[in-house]
Image (spheres, rainbow, N blue to C red):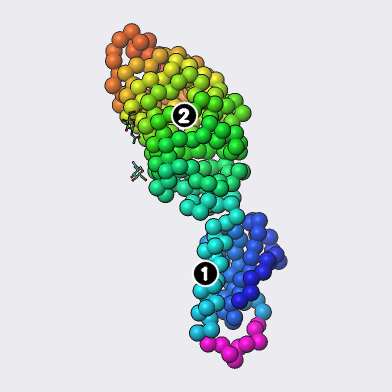
Amino acid sequence: MRIESYVPPFALPYPSHVLISCPLTLTLLFSTPNYPFSIHPHPVPLPSLNNFSPLTMLPCVFWLQLVLILLSRGENCPVTCLCPDPHTVDCSGRGLTRLPDEIPLDVRRLLLADNWIPRIPSDFLVLYSDLVYLDLRNNSLSHIEPGTLSTTSRLVFLDLGSNNLTEIPKGTFGESRSLIKLRLGNNPYLSMVNEEAFLGLTSLRELELERNALSTLKVGALSQLPSLRVVRLEGNPWVCNCNFASLFAWLMENSHKLPNGK
Ligand SMILES: *[C@@H]1O[C@H](CO)[C@@H](O)[C@H](O)[C@H]1NC(C)=O
Ligand SMILES: *[C@@H]1O[C@H](CO)[C@@H](O)[C@H](O)[C@H]1NC(C)=O
């Protein structure tokens, strides 16, 4: 078996290529961390044609598979995750109880849904400053540390739905100007949203707060959002007091922003 770096005679959209050949039959041309691999016929005839036996092939195929398993982890892809393209890390539904190690620093889409992650460090988005899409749906987050998001964050989409958040304090989202869609629904203990929770989210178009434990919401929390087009509030145990009256009035005026008229 030969393993060598291989520069293909044609352009492939991947950074690195490796050629693995077993006697006679298999050449695998693949790139890391992209897979599946493509299998090509061997490009040069081998002299050992007479000695060919399926048995001699077996160890080679075994080693080839082993090398593939090792290499398919990629230089950058966390061991338990998939990296379907150079900017996406998909660790959804892996039973993770914390953030995986070795997430490439230039990740743009990070999918962490359906795990048991209880917290994200406050410097996470400083470190992963290229992140535009962060899916933390259905984890065990109970709060977002202040300063996690900032004005410089590039995050466009943030899904914190189906977690265990209890309140959204003032400045949680750090005047993050890129944020367009924020999902906060299905947090069954989320009963407090500060009037200035979303302050500075000047690009926010879609805000989901459905099926939380909100009995009240200051109208200012919504009316301060200049780009808001869609807001979901259904499935909360609203209490009809003065606060609610002003929220209700705002909702009537802005009923076009409510997806299902609730
Ligand atoms: C939430 O994540 C858990 C753990 O991975 C999974 O078993 C469950 O089906 C997920 N729930 C939903 C609604 O996707
Ligand atoms: C969610 O939060 C509630 C109330 O703070 C707590 O009782 C519960 O144990 C938490 N559940 C999980 C899965 O962390």
Mark 1 element type? helix
Q: Residue at x 54, y 42 (%)?
A: 109
Ligand 1 visible in quadrant:
top left
Q: Quadrant of the C terminus?
A: top left
The label number, if any, that marks residue 65 in the structure image: 1
> Was residue 51 drawn as part of the magenta stretch in this picture?
yes
Q: Which residues are magenta?
A: 45-53
Classify 13 as above or below 29: above
* Dot 2 and dot 1 residues touching (CB under 8 Å): no
In the image, the residue with mark 2 has its CB under 8 Å from the nearest atom of ligand 2? no
Badge 1 density bin: few <14, some 14–19, many ≥20, Cα 10 Å: few
Closest to the observer, 129 or 158: 129
Classify 234 as above or below 242: below
Quadrant of the rendered structure where residue 123 is?
Answer: top right
Q: Residue at x 32, y 18 (%)?
A: 215
Could one spot residue 234 in this view of the protein? Answer: no
Q: Residue at x 64, y 65 (%)?
A: 18
Could one spot residue 128 in this view of the protein? Answer: yes
Which residue bears the numbered disc 2?
A: 144
Q: Position of residue 60 (x, y in %)?
A: 55, 77
Amino acid tagged 1: Gln
Looking at the image, is mark 2 or mark 1 earlier in the sequence?
1
Mark 2 element type? loop
Does residue 224 appear left or right of residue 232 in this picture? Answer: right
Amino acid tagged 2: Ile
The label number, if any, that marks residue 84 in the structure image: none
Q: Position of residue 229 (x, y in %)?
A: 47, 24
The alpha-carbon separation of the residues under discs 2 and 1 comes to: 42 Å
